[in-house]
Image (cartoon, grey):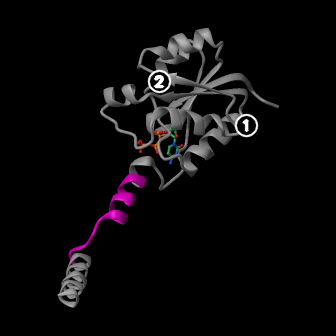
């Protein structure tokens, strides 16, 4: 039996990963309808956050997840109370990296903080990607030797 009728969550969902999927799956198990507010690129720059994947793509990816019923844009910090009222939300949920931050919403609906999936985040993925793509001085030396040899062979 589902506990809630309409539950809402907010996030950037950049480089969609297993932590995002686990969260959405657990949320859908708690509600009949799951609404996900995905941060727009403009809102992210306001938060000094930069996503690799543009908003339109992030929104489509989240929308295609079978646990998600509806995606709306998250454009500013103030919209939550308005969303809760206009969508008839009975629960707000988010990962526990935000623990306590949204307690002010308890006046309007239940507020739930869920434990995050360990050892994965968009920030971590971006760091791994940077390391993966970085060229070591040894690699550069090898490339230089190969190119020098090629040049000599052509002369
Ligand atoms: N989340 C989670 N477990 C993770 C990562 C994220 O449960 N390992 C949850 C967050 O707590 C949030 C939602 O997924 O409720 C969307 O989070 P988002 O900030 O988009 O994901 P992060 O991977 O934490 O992104 P960043 O590293 O940019 O903060």
Please give the name of the residue rendered at 56% of the width and 14% of the height, measured from the top-left corner. Answer: 83
Q: Is residue 16 above or below residue 95?
A: below
Please tell me whether mark 1 or mark 2 is closer to you in this view.
1
Q: Earlier in the sequence, mark 1 or mark 2?
A: 1
Which disc, if any, is residue 102?
Answer: 2
Which disc, if any, is residue 29?
Answer: 1
Q: Which residues are magenta?
A: 125-137
Q: Position of residue 92 (x, y in %)?
A: 58, 24
| The N terminus sits in image quarter | top right
Q: Say whether residue 25 is left or right of residue 154.
A: right
Q: Say whether residue 36 is left or right of residue 137.
A: right
In what element is the residue under mark 2?
loop
**Ligand 1 is within 8 Å of the C-beta of the residue at disc 2:** no
Q: Which residue is most to the right?
A: 1
The verdict on residue 132 being magenta is: yes
Question: How far apart in space, not on screen, are marks 1 and 2 (Cα)?
Answer: 21 Å
């Amino acid at each position: 039996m589902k506990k809630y009728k309409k539950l809402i969550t907010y996030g950037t969902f950049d480089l969609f990963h297993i932590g995002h999927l686990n969260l959405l799956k657990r949320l859908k198990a708690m509600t009949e309808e799951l609404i996900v507010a995905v941060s727009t690129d403009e809102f992210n720059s306001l938060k000094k956050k930069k996503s690799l994947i543009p908003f339109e793509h992030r929104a489509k990816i989240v929308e295609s997840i079978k646990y998600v019923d509806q995606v709306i844009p998250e454009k500013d910090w103030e919209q939550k109370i308005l969303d809760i009222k206009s969508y008839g939300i009975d629960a707000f949920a988010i990962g526990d990296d935000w623990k306590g931050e949204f307690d002010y919403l308890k006046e309007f609906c239940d507020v739930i903080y869920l434990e995050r999936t360990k050892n994965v985040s968009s920030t971590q993925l971006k760091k791994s990607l940077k390391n993966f793509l970085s060229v070591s001085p040894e690699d550069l030396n090898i490339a230089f030797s190969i190119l020098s040899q090629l040049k000599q062979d052509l002369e």
